[in-house]
Image (cartoon, rainbow, N blue to C red):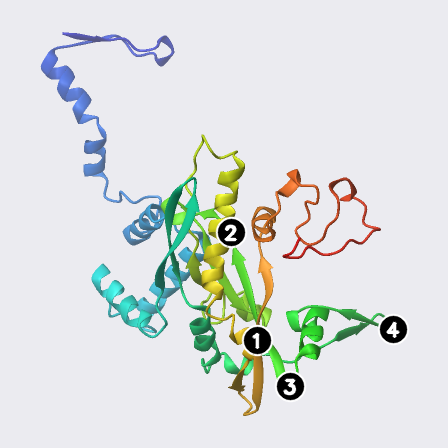
Amino acid sequence: SFKTEFHPKSGRPMVLESFSTFDHSHHDAGPKSIAENDSEPWHPFQICGDFEFSELAHKAALNKDLMNQLLALIQHLVSGEAKLTLHSDHDVMEAWAHAAKLMTPFEKHVVNVHHAKHDLKFNVHYHPLWDWAMDILQDPHLQPHFVWDAQCLYKNNGECFECFIDEPWTADRWWNIQSSLPQQDAAPFAFILYADKSHLLSLGKVKAYPIIICCGNLPTHIRNSNHGLGGGQLVGWLPIVPEDSANDRKFSYTNLKRVVWHQVILKLLNTITHLSKASFAYKTHDGLMRTLYLIILILSADYEEQCMMSLIRGLNSSCPCPICLMPLNELCDHSKTHPCQTSEE
């Protein structure tokens, strides 16, 4: 037999039960019995469909924006404003495969680096920058939005006009570059590159090293959009040199990471290097012929990546600024100017 004693504050007397009675009484009170008798197990959700969608969204870890987009699409489908012909994962992947054929595919190359008497091989996957450039230049939806000529913008403050900058072509560098080009109709075709080692959101702790590119000739609301057309595009994956606890702090291993980074970037830039000097003709949306010169206008990166790009040792170097040769002990002194870093340095 079984005896059950309840807490004194419950006011319930002790219960003695046989094995069969005890077993049935506990199982009958279990969750299964409650669920079977519940006519609305999705409560407090209003209907079963609301619960099933919320559960699926939770499992897929959808963020707020994606959840709103998916709900809006479902509402359009329900109201008949939109139609859906996809029925399975196979249909989705097949549709993506057909769409991918309209764009230039990624290429795989191997970079060889000699280190510690060994030849190391690193795989690099990238989308040729010239092909990407042709894709956006020939896109009829983007052509009306390209800006080729430098501009100076001023705002009247009540007393005089003050210059301000809100786009790449309104800054001094664009003006100076266009002034230095030989042809009257010449203009820069500006690339903005971004690279940063990060974790893939959908794969947890998996590290990746994406290279993102966008066109500086397109307005901010287009090039910084997340809708795909004219926005930042993935053009490559930099290889990640594996961590080695025994060698991580060694000078040679640190150099290995930098050598790999620069050789891969050089491989990526080789598709446009000659065009940055030779230029090419382009017929704009308004029918004018322009002579375009490819330039890397901006390398966008955090400090760690900038140290990699400029081949300095970060805060451990005598001149830790990736732009100029400011000494470490003068970093807080903004009253002085220093010569710029160069490849010869």
Amino acid type indicated by mark 3: Gln
Disc 1 and disc 3 in contact, CB within 8 angstroms: no
Give percent across and percent down for residue 245: 45, 31
Task: State which tag comes first along the sequence, 3 or 2.
Answer: 3
Residue 88 appears in the figure: no
Is residue 333 toward the left or the right of residue 25 in the image? Answer: right
Give percent across and percent down for residue 337: 80, 54
Q: Which mark is residue 109?
A: none
Q: Nearer the viewer, residue 104 or 152?
A: 104
Tag count in the figure? Answer: 4
Is residue 257 toward the left or the right of residue 70 in the image? Answer: right
Task: State which tag comes first along the sequence, 3 or 4.
Answer: 4
Relative height, residue 88 to residue 202 (above, below): below
The residue beneath circle 4 is 160
Alpha carbons under labels 2 and 1: distance apart: 28 Å
Q: Residues within 10 Å of mark 3 (few under 14, many from 20)?
A: few
Disc 3 and disc 4 in contact, CB within 8 angstroms: no
Q: Nearer the viewer, residue 61 or 98?
A: 98
Amino acid type indicated by mark 4: Cys
Task: State which tag comes first along the sequence, 1 or 4.
Answer: 4
Q: Which mark is residue 183?
A: 3
Q: Quadrant of the N terminus?
A: top left
Mark 3 or mark 2, whichever is nearer to me: 3
Alpha carbons under labels 1 and 3: distance apart: 13 Å
Query: Farthest residue toward the bottom?
Result: 287
Q: Secondary structure at mark 4?
A: loop
